[in-house]
Image: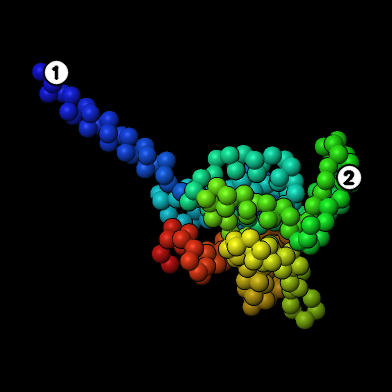
Amino acid sequence: MKIKFIIPIVALVILIGASFQKLQDKPVLYIIGDSTVQNGSGKGADSLWGWGSFMYLYLKTDKIEIQNHAKGGRSSRTFLTDGRWDSIIKAIKKGDYVLMQFGHNDGGELADTLRARGTIKGIGDESQDIYNPIRKVNETVYTFGYYMRKYANEAKSKGAIPIIVSPIPRNKFNEKGKIDKDQYGVWAKEVAQQTGAYFLDLNNMVIEKYEKMGAEKVKAFFPKDHTHTNKEGAIVNAELVTKGIRELRKCDLKNYLKRK
C-alpha cells in the first residue's frame, strides 16, 4: 500500500519544485529615481504621484515583477550613498531590468546643511572632496554621469538590462508656450551611449505632449508645484514610458507589455 503513494508524492514534489523554479526565474523590473517616479510612500499623499506607481497598468505582472525603489528627494548621488542601490544590486539577476531616472535633485548644493545631495554637472570624471554635514562624513562627490554610469555598468555586470530615462520636465512654459529641454536629459542620453544602455527620452516625449496640450490643461497635472504630478499627470507620463519601451529596438522588456 505504501508503494502506491510514493509515485504521486514524488510527482507532487517535482511539480512544486518546478513551479518554485519558474517563480524564481520570473524577471524583475527595478525602478529607481526620485519623487517624480515615486512620491512619498507611493500611496498618493497630498494627491501627488510618480509615474513608476502606475507601470503595473501596462505590464503583464503575472510575467514580470515590478519593484519601484524610487525615493523622494534623492539624486543620482544620494540614492547610492543612502545604500538603496546596494540592496538592489545584491538581489538583481540575469534577465532583470532597471529603469533609472535622475536629475531633478542633482542640481543642488554639494555640501549644504539642508540636503547635501547635488552632483557635479556633466558626465566627466571630475570629483570634489567635501565634508557632508548631513551624514557627518568626508565624501568624494562625482558628476551626474559618474553615478549614472555606475548604475548602468553594475546592472550589466550582473546580466541585467539597464534603461536610462531622461527626467520628466517641470511645468515651466515660457512666453512662447514652449518648455525648455532639460540638460540632464542630454547627459542621460550621452551616458546611455557611453555604457551601451538603452535610452528612453522621456523628457522630450513629455515636452511634446505638454506643448500640444497647452499650459492651461497641463497646469491641472500639478496641484502643488511645478515638479510633482497628480494621479492623472503620473498616468500620462507612465503611458509615455510605456510607449518609449515599446519603441526601444531589440529590448525584450517590450515583450512584457500588455497589448494596446
Labelled disc at residue 195: none
Q: Are marks 1 and 2 in contact (CB under 8 Å)?
A: no
* Residue 210 visible to an observer of this rendering: no
Q: What x and y, as percent, mark residue 26?
A: 43, 46
Residue 63 appears left or right of 105: left
Report which residue position mark 2 lands on: 130
Classify mark 2: helix, strand or loop.
Answer: strand
Q: What x and y, as percent, mark residue 254?
A: 46, 62
| Residue occupying the point 65% across, 44% down | 85
| Residue occupying the point 67% across, 76% down | 211
Q: What x and y, as percent, mark residue 138?
A: 86, 39
Labelled disc at residue 2: 1
Residue 110 appears left or right of 180: right
Classify mark 1: helix, strand or loop.
Answer: helix
Q: What x and y, as percent, mark residue 121?
A: 81, 60
* Kind of residue at badge 2: Ile
Circle 2 residues within 10 Å: few <14, some 14–19, many ≥20 = few
Name the one closer to the observer, 104 or 79: 79
